[in-house]
Image: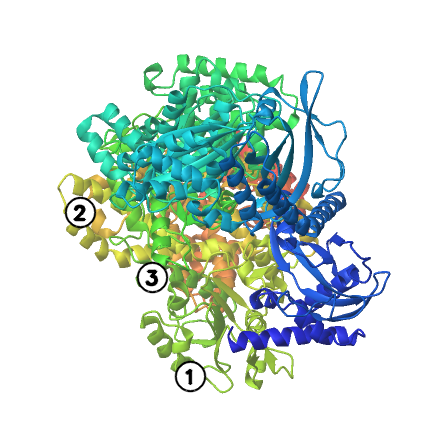
Amino acid sequence: MSASLEQSREQLLHAAAELGAHAGGEGLETFLQGYYRHVATEDLLARAPEDLLGAATHHMELARTRPVGTVNVEVFNPEVEEQGWASAHTVVQVVTDDMPFLVDSVTSELSRMGRTVHLIVHPLMVVRRNAAGDLEEVIGRGTRDSGVDADTNGGFGVVRESWMHVEVDRESDPEDRADIAANLRRVLSDVREAVEDWPKMRAKCSEIAEALKTAPPAGIPTDEVDQTRRLLDWLSDNHFTFLGYREYRLGRENGTDVLTAVQGSGLGLLRYDSSPEGVRLSEQASAVAREPKLLIVTKANSRATVHRSTYLDYVGIKTFDEQGEVTGEKRFLGLFTSTAYTESVTRIPVLQDKINAIFERTGFATDSHSGKDLLEVLETYPRDELFQADEEELHDNTTAVLHLQERRKTKLFLRKDEFGRFMSCLVYIPRDRYNTAVRLRMETILRKAFSGASVDYTTRVSESALARLHFVVRVPQGQRIPEVDVDVLEKQLIDATRTWDEDLAEAARTEVGEESAARLSSLYGKAFPEAYKEDFTPRVGVADIRHMEALDTDETTGLNMYQEPGGPSHERRFKLYRRGPLSLTQVLPMFTHLGVEVVDERPYEIDRGDGVTVHIYDFGLRVRNEKVWTGEARDRTRELFQDAVGAVWNGHAESDGFNALVLGAGLTWRQVVIIRTVAKYLRQTQSTFSQDYLENALVQNLPIAAMLVELFEERFDPSRYAGAAGPDRTAAEEAVADRIEKALDAVKSLDQDRIIRAFLGVIRATLRTNYFQDSGPAAVGGPSADGGPSADGGAKSYVSLKLNPKAVPDLPAPRPAFEIWVYSPRVEGVHLRFGPVARGGLRWSDRREDFRTEVLGLVKAQMVKNAVIVPTGSKGGFYAKQLPDPTVDRDAWLAEGIASYKLFISGLLDITDNRVGSEVVPPKDVVRHDSDDPYLVVAADKGTATFSDIANGVAQSYGFWLDDAFASGGSAGYDHKAMGITARGAWESVKRHFREMGVDTQTQDFTAVGIGDMSGDVFGNGMLLSEHIRLVAAFDHRHIFIDPDPDAARSYPERKRLFELPRSSWADYDESLISKGGGVFDRSLKSVTVTPEMVEALGLPQGTEHMTPAELMKAILQAPVDLLWNGGIGTYVKASTEENSAIGDRANDAIRVNGHQLRCKVVGEGGNLGFSQLGRIEASLHGVRINTDAIDNSAGVDTSDHEVNIKILLTGLTRDGDMTLKQRNTLLASMTDDVAASVLRDNYEQNVLLGNARAQEHGMLPVHQRLIHWLEERGDLDRELEFLPSDAELDRRASEGLGLKSPEFSVLVAYSKLALKEDLLSSELPDDPWFQATLAGYFPRPIREQFPEQINQHPLRREIITNAVVNSMVNRGGITFAFRAMEETGANPEQIARAFVVAREIFDLPGFVAEVQALDNQVGTDVQTQLYLEFRRLIDRSIRWFLTSRPSRLDVASEVARYQDVVRDFAPQIPAMLKGAEVKRMERNALAYEHLGVPEELARRSASLLDQFSLLDLVDICSDTGEQPDSVAALYFTVSEKFSIDLMLGRVTNLPRDDRWDALARGALRDDLYAVLESLVRSVIEASDAEKEPAERYEQWAKANAESLTRARTALAGIERLERPNIAALSVALRTLRSVIRAGAAAS
């Protein structure tokens, strides 16, 4: 033992003794040293000191009292709570007198009881006890060879004791522990009896030997007596452990021999007298007993309890009378000692005589070669057999063994016990064939042959060519040993020794032929493990080899289901073959999901000869209903099950509870995919039911599940009904649906009914699917592993469903127009479209459970954003389900994400129509339940920013007509960051907000804080859009930047440098340019030191010295600055009424603020989702100028839309060869600035629209409220979803002089435009030839000039025209323009749009707008708003006039031609034509505009805008009368002045507008006034001389109508004197004027 170990041992025992000393014990260390003296140090060091102390002291307590000759035994489970020490095992402690065989006997008994021994502590203790057995002193440790004789040297009461501490497997049952103690006491009693009587038994043996010498029995040959005597002497010479002795008398009672024990003759284990009746002997035993043979050496019927647990050796010496008849027996029981088994047979009495006789019979000399070999056989022959077998048997057997060694064959030798109790079976086999399996097989064969109750065996494997097995087969007591055919039995044993490998080679030759078998044998001949050989025959091995040979890669898996011969009918076995290993956790759930129970698993490792390892996993499978396996379709069931396992294992199908439908409903795994696809969709629709619940509902209703699949196949199988939807298919589908409905009546569970109906609803709402498409080359765009086309054939690995969301039950709002759901084990995705032509990004979502909810929330913003462009909103999202850990292998993570993205896009394209020229081509093998739908465009989004080329590559692989227009922003598209387009668009909003505050951001310094860094697109580009930005602070995900007192001129170049520096961060900022007290701080810091300058700049509480990074960023968001610019990712502002958990951005919970906490003046939302909508509204209500992200950053989607539509036009040219791809790309790049200008124009105009709305927020609130109601009634708007205020809230705002706020207007703008687009697109308006110019105007000049014909043939020409018209109507007419026109006139949207376009063109709205826009930063935005609204009044009146005065369907071109020239010519002259009060009014208004900074010409034009409206009547009058416009115009304004028409129009304008009816009344009065004026003019023309001047003509008419005019003037004068005439007074005025017209007509 090493010194360090010894030292550790001493320290441990010392520590244990110290614990005892504290408890009052003394001298413990010496005791412990002795107690644990023979325990290995390693065992001691594994124990705690308190446990060592406890075990030893507890043993001492057990030894406190032990009367002489007794034994103390305790079996217990020590616990700390009770004993103060513990052991993981059950403890057995024994105290008894020291004697031989104690430990062997105790451990043997424990082994017999099946108790594993973990530790033995066996000190020999010399103790002193008093007469009562009380322990007085532990004198010390004793040894049997120490020379200390406790009985003589120690004085009275000193004894040497054996203390045994044994730890066995833990036993908690007190009764079982009591049994252990009782059995040990019995065994220890046996030991005591045997040891105490051993000298007597040995003496008895010598005595008998001496008696044989002096008085040999009569009738026994002298050599036999001498042989027996010598054997007895040999036994007593320490070759036999004497355990028992008894004498018996042989008598005869009732014709039967009886063996009776001689009372008082017993010693040792036979000390106590047995029953005096004696034992009746069997016929066989009687024959042996009566045989005149002196010596019996055999085995007893019982096992030894002392020393070794083996059958006792039985040595009997018969007694004879004078006549030589047997009279009895002197019997010794014991065990031959080890020396008896190792000593040479030539020196053992009895045996040496047998050996000599055998040599004599063989004739071999002992020193000859054969003699030596024979002697070796005899020396190694089972010693018991040598004693028990007769000479002849030994001769025959040993000589046969001798010959066997030369031939290496298997041989069986049998010897029947002379008492008929057992059969001794000696088996020799070639050594290389021996193993445990062979022995067990032999044991089984022999047990069965002899009906054995037990089998004992010994083996001998040496250098000899043969191994020897000796079996002793004992038959049940009282039964005869059966007779057997030795040859047959030997043949069975030979077969058992024949190697499995040999049988495998033979089976292979039979199955596959000699040549193939040779190759397989070289690979598999030695490959199978023993466990496999024990479980399967070689023929099965050949079958398994076939499966293993089919494994061509490490990932390939072979499958085989079979019924084990003789196995239960409800069980099957299933084998998996793989080169790579697998764990049970990979397999068990798969089988459980398939509805089977795995009852056992047998793994086998096959090590082939070529070094390849193959694994076979054999599973026992059980089903509850055995009919699953045994029905008529059992072969199909096997195929279904095996295919399903293969699909799951190979990743083609997921492992879940739906797989139980394979066995339960007889579905293929592919049919189960239909159910799973629908279920996964339902889980994404916010279903309240878990996946387990959905699975359970179908598994418990198997017939309905099968019918759902049948319904799906009837609806979509292209091999039926000529591959088209039609009446026959519909009828078949309805029949299946009716059966499902009837079956549902029997479903008792309401939940299950709802679930099944949900499945039914989704299937019936499905319009298309790719389920039946083949993935081979015949199918356009079949996906490969990476999502592209595949040529391998077979079913696709994913399923796409195109749905009609409005038909899906219980789908959450808003419901898109179309939805595509893509499912596969690898990826799931959804694409929502709100119209046939829609566009939006595809997001890589990280929300597995609710990514549809995420996409649905995003698509609302997308719709608002897309209101300005041609397509309506769409959005897609996918979740990659098999992503590797990015922290381990980011490249693999990205590769899997891209592959999932490709699969998702393939799923979309699979069921999307294509265009070939002007023809729409449906996808192959898709039954369409909807109309043509070829428009599918996607874009980048979160996680897919760089994926556009990937998406276009997939589209091109499908030959999709959009080519690389499918996904904008690719390598051949417009680079948004290089253009800075998103930031520039948002900056238009910023500039507008600042202009409303009187600040020009491009010339005046202003402060800002921001979210992002200069390397980002939106933030970086945005912070370079003005050289007057004073950026006080910003943060991104890495750093916090603070410049408390920034210098705009110095900081701008530094920001520009960072923007141009690849992968820059705020850490790269030149800190020398940062003002005092600022710096760049890492967000990972625990705390940031806050300087006084930071306190001032950020408006922090005085005295603030330290803040965490999160607190500092929160302060930045609340900083008192001019601008908060969001160019980052995340949601940073919410409403105070919202919880962080509702925002869905946990990463920013710590820094998020509420809208009312913002202290900035303006917010620019360059990034998406920076604010919640409620947060925006709350901020706006607290004075912050903010729109929405959809308004601010719409330039990105607008640019992409232009790119897509330009590419659509040019792609046709490249396909036809009229333009090369290089030429196309060059042209695209050359138009970058044109596209940007067009896009920014949209941003500008929407901001003007919102500014005008904000200016009228209170006055127009009733109209806004009515518009909201109208949109709700249409089903377009969900007010709660869009966070628009309730009617009660609107009433509250109205009472406070408020209205809708800008974020709310932003939403209303979008819905207003979307509603108009929907209505106009379905009308004939886009087909009106006049709008060809509108179509051309959408495209940049190079396109217009080079490709006019292609523009007119653009597939989206109608959508482009509609979009342009709607944008113009809403941007210029206002959010409520069309709605009000419909409300006031009853006209439909098409009629209103035509009227608007006519009015716009006639009155040159674009020219007027250009003049007003030129006043940016020259006059206030409120002035510009007045000018815009004034023109809007003209448009309002004009379209009402056209709708009521012109044909119901206006021909735009004709109407424009009719009116435009006159209006263009006379509009500038109107100021000069006005008379009297009207000209004064105009001059007054013009002067007011001029005072506000409006140029004189524009001021006069604006002041006379409403007067231009009269030119429409003027044109009609001229047309009807033939008069010239100049004369009619002068007369018109003369009449207007004479009748104070302008004054009354002003009074009408001042009428209340509290509700719709007020508005209608005001409009009607105004129209009537204009109509009366027109009639009066016509009356004057008819009654006057055309040659006269206008004033003269009027006077001529007035004289003719003097009386009526006098009455009219009297009435009108009274009304004019009223300060605020009401509608009644104005109605009277109108009636009065009409009377004048009637009078004039009469006079004429």
Query: Can see residue 1387?
Result: no
Marks 3 and 2: CB-CB under 8 Å?
Answer: no
- Per the image, label 3 sits on a secondary structure element best described as helix
Rendered image: mark on residue 977: 3
Q: Could you tell me the amino acid type at mark 2?
A: Gln
Q: How far apart are marks 3 and 2 (CA)?
A: 29 Å
> Which image quarter: residue 962?
top left
Residue extending farthest right: 132
User: 1003 and 21: which one is in front?
Assistant: 21
- Per the image, label 1 sits on a secondary structure element best described as helix
Where residue 1452 appears, as percent x and y from the top left, is 35, 37
Task: Answer with left or right where residue 777 lies relative to residue 687.
Answer: left
- The residue under label 2 is 1346
Q: How far apart are marks 1 and 2 (CA)?
A: 53 Å
In the image, residue 1428 sits, relative to residue 53, either above or below, namely above
User: 1559 and 24: which one is in front?
Assistant: 24
Q: Could you tell me the amino acid type at mark 3?
A: Lys
Which badge, 1 or 2, is on the more N-terminal residue?
1
Which badge, 3 or 2, is on the more N-terminal residue?
3
Give the number of the mark in front: 3 or 2: 3
Circle 1 residues within 10 Å: few <14, some 14–19, many ≥20: some
Q: How far apart are marks 1 and 3 (CA)?
A: 26 Å
Give the number of the mark in front: 1 or 3: 1
Residue at (52, 44) in percent of width and height: 230
Which badge, 1 or 3, is on the more N-terminal residue?
3
Q: Could you tell me the amino acid type at mark 1?
A: Glu
Residue at (72, 65) in percent of width and height: 56
Task: Answer with left or right where residue 887 lies relative to residue 1220.
Answer: right
- Per the image, label 2 sits on a secondary structure element best described as helix
- The residue under label 1 is 1071
> Which image quarter: residue 490?
top left
